[in-house]
Image (cartoon, rainbow, N blue to C red):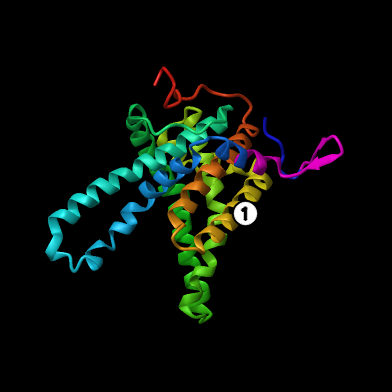
Amino acid sequence: MHHVVYQPQERGERRLYFLDIRAGFFTLLADRFWFPKIFLGGLLLINPILLALAPKLSGGFEDHKSLLFALLAINVGSFWFALGFTYEVLRRARFGKPQLPEWSPAMLGQYLREGAVKFTIALTTLLLPLILWVALSYSVFIRLLGLPPNLLSLFVPLGSWLVVPFCAVACCRWLDGASVLSCALDYRENFRLFWKRRGDFLIASTFLAGLNAILMSLFYTIPFALFFGLCLVDTWFGPIYASTVDREVGSIASADSPNS
């Protein structure tokens, strides 16, 4: 059951605030294998990016061309599994199943498929709006007003703050039975649902940005911060989205359910 994040609850003489945030941490950390799952997911999520540096680190592209292409194919493929895992986290949060899913081989096919779905939706609801925002910021503040180009990164967090929950709404619509193209391109419906609980969505997005900024400042925790942040925020976005819809539509079976 979703609780508005700014609504306190009485428990004896204590007043509890930010219940969604507390519930999100509890959901992840209550799983006794949460750390190895986050560790594996973080590596799978960021490995394709790290591999792009391999030619420089290994002495040149020409010396290891075949090996690097093979590793790139494997690691890009692994990217989908991590995204699919976070999609299952979102599904469980959306429909009230609190535990984290498993990295069982039986689920990898569904993770691969749903990772592709999530990335397709993210292309138009997350990456494209963010690119357009950065381009607009560059045109106005760098080209027109003459600010130093190295200040451009200051404008990225504001764009991310808005588009991350917008993308989550689109992903939740797919769980409710909408087509991939509708979720990716129907900006009007996505925005309508986002706007109904904009306060809750944006508070969760703000907390995610702050958490990732702190963890990424250590550099070596970047992949785990990204993956932990994705899983954590999905445990909030799912219930917030559930409170915006009038009725629930049957979801695709959970990845480790008997029907998957």
Coordinates of residue 232 in the picture (x, y in percent)? 55, 44
Image position of 137 with respect to 122: above or below = below
Direction from residue 107 to residue 72 in the image, left or right: left
- Residue 42 counted in the magenta span: no
Foreground pick, 115 / 32: 32
Q: Quick check: 200 left or right of 105?
A: right
Q: Quadrant of the C terminus?
A: top left
Q: In the image, 193: left or right of 70?
A: right
Quarter occupied by residue 8:
top right
The image shows residue 175, relative to residue 222, as above or below, that is above
Q: Which residue is mark 1?
A: 206
Q: Is residue 8 above or below residue 259?
A: below
Q: Residue at x 66, y 50 (%)?
A: 203
Q: Which residues are magenta?
A: 7-24
Query: Which element carries disc 1, helix, strand or loop?
Result: helix
Crowd band around label 1 with a 10 angstrom C-alpha radius: few (<14), some (14–19), many (20+)? some
